Image (cartoon, rainbow, N blue to C red):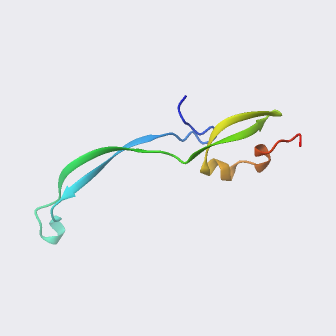
Amino acid sequence: MPRVCAVTGRKTRSTTSSKRKGSPRKRGGVGLKQVGVHKRQIKPNLQKRTVWVDGKPQKVWLSAKALKSIDPSLLVNPNK
């Protein structure tokens, strides 16, 4: 099961970062040359939390942004 936020749908993204060498043309150089490309993964800040749905506990992955936005009463047991 992949780690995806149950509220916002955030998941791991894949991007590339590149290294450049040289001096830009604006400053009188011959231009920037790309010398290396690396793939990297950007992972969201996911945390496993117990949420109460219809009076039953359910463990779900929530992003930090979702934890701030959801109603705090969903995170505590309503029967206590």
Q: Residue 32 location, x and y as percent? A: 17, 59
Q: Nearer the viewer, residue 30 or 16?
A: 16
| Residue beneath the point at 57% across and 39% down | 9
Locate residue 24: give its quadrant. bottom left
Locate residue 78: give its quadrant. top right
Residue extending furthest toward the top: 1
Q: Residue 2 location, x and y as percent? A: 53, 32
| Residue beneath the point at 14% across and 60% down | 31
Q: How many numbered tags mark residues here?
A: 0
Q: Nearer the viewer, residue 3 or 31?
A: 3
Q: Is residue 34 left or right of residue 9?
A: left
| Residue beneath the point at 12% across and 70% down | 28
| Residue beneath the point at 71% across and 48% down | 70
Q: Is residue 8 left or right of residue 18?
A: right
Q: Residue 7 location, x and y as percent? A: 64, 40
Residue extending furthest toward the right: 80
Q: Residue 57 location, x and y as percent? A: 77, 34
